[in-house]
Image: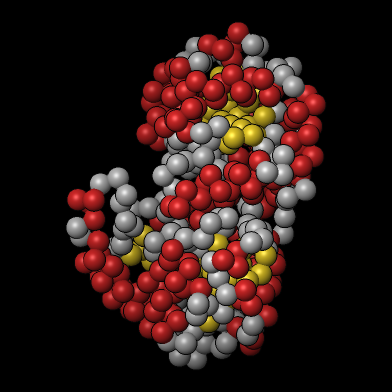
Amino acid sequence: MSDAKSENTAMVPPLGGGGGRIIIAGGGTGGHIFPAIAIANAIKKMQPQTEILFVGAKGKMEMEKVPQAGYKIEGLDIAGFNRSSLIKNIGLPFKLIKSFFQVKKIINTFKPDAVIGVGGYSSFPVLRLAQSKGIKTFIHESNSFAGKSNMMLGRKATKIFVATDGMEKFFPSQKIQITGNPVRATISQSAVTREEGIKFFGLDPAKKTILSVGGSLGAKSINEALDKDIEAFEKNDLQLIWQTGKPYGVKGKQRGEGRKNIWVNDFITQMEYAYAAADAVISRSGAMAVTELCVMKKPVVFVPFPFAAEDHQTVNAQNLVSKNAALIIKDNEAAEKLVPTIIHLINDGSKQNELKNNIEKLAITNADEIIAKEILDTF
């Protein structure tokens, strides 16, 4: 894939001429980064000469994941509002001002024909400056409850791609297109069998298997609930694939040590094998987790992160629960209810089938292609 070049950009033809330049801005979590990479890949597939530059936040996971996918990324000195510690927000205005100067240099050098925002605080200054210069801007809002930055940017955006219906309360209705959320091709096009998935984790294919994922950064309440009731899995002849996230990685591995029915690591790099192995799933309800579980047709117990902006994870989960496509447990009830609930579910075949049939109806597997085509067709 082409690296963006900063020299001799004045003669770059527009996208309609077979080339062109696009900035994709945002990140912070896998829920923003992986859809962004999926969109970039779809654009390159349709228009191979397109140059793509990512812009993210220094110190965040996009600075690692984007280059691994073959794209160049520029990092901004920016941070989001810290809801748990107001004292940490003192330097926020200065970082925001500095980031605007950095963005101005990036845009003036790269000369994009379009800018795509995928969420995360690094997307705001990039799209805001692009809009002030009359550059086409596109927003992908992955959640059922739009973030404040996206709502502000939506008024001047060229088009807004959303995952679900009912988003007119956040954005101008004439700019909205329901596309779903882009899913990594390794997942949406996976042909991995359950047996292959189980073997990948060194587990027993004859035993029912539960997958627990707490997002790319882990989930404290889920980890503590599994830790507390770890013996229940062996007592019920069940296996557990446990992604802890980095903060709980060492402790999780200590708890899983010597237990043949439990696989533990802080991160799962090949999620297609984890989904294939799982008979039921425990998960946070970030937008991408919800989307991937719909595509993979998995019965799931959601434990929404209650401190997400506007409590959007609860909104995401309730959207499925209302369609009888998932179960939900409150974060502060996970310690007592999570393990008993998932064990009951995995032993209830009829409930699993009901959830699988209903969650499958919500799956969209080609969102990346839809979004890429819509962007390229505007030029």
On screen, 38 above or below 249?
Answer: below
Q: Give the image location of residue 189, x and y in percent.
A: 73, 49
Q: Nearer the viewer, residue 242 or 121?
A: 121
| Residue at point 50%, 15% (across, down) | 229
- In the rendered image, is residue 120 in sight? yes
Frontmost residue, 261 versus 322: 322
Where, by quadrant of the figure, is residue 355 drawn? top right
Residue 375 in percent (x, y) is at: 63, 75
Residue 350 horizontal/vertical position (percent): 80, 26
Question: Residue at 60% of width from left, 40% of height from top?
Answer: 271
* Left or right of 253 in this view: 321: right
- The N terminus, quarter of image: bottom right
Screen quadrant of the C terminus: bottom right
How many marks are shown on the rendered structure?
Answer: 0
Snapshot colouring:
secondary structure
The answer to whether residue 296 is seen in the rendering is no
Question: 257 or 211, which is in the foreground?
Answer: 211
Position of residue 345 relative to residue 285, above or below, is above
Out of 15 and 251, give the one closest to the viewer.
251
Which residue is most to the bottom? 11
- Residue at image x 47%, y 33%? 331
To which quarter of the image does residue 327 belong? top right
Write down the quadrant of residue 198 in the picture.
top right
| x then y, percent, for residue 25 | 46, 67
User: Residue visible at 77% across and 48% down?
Assistant: 361
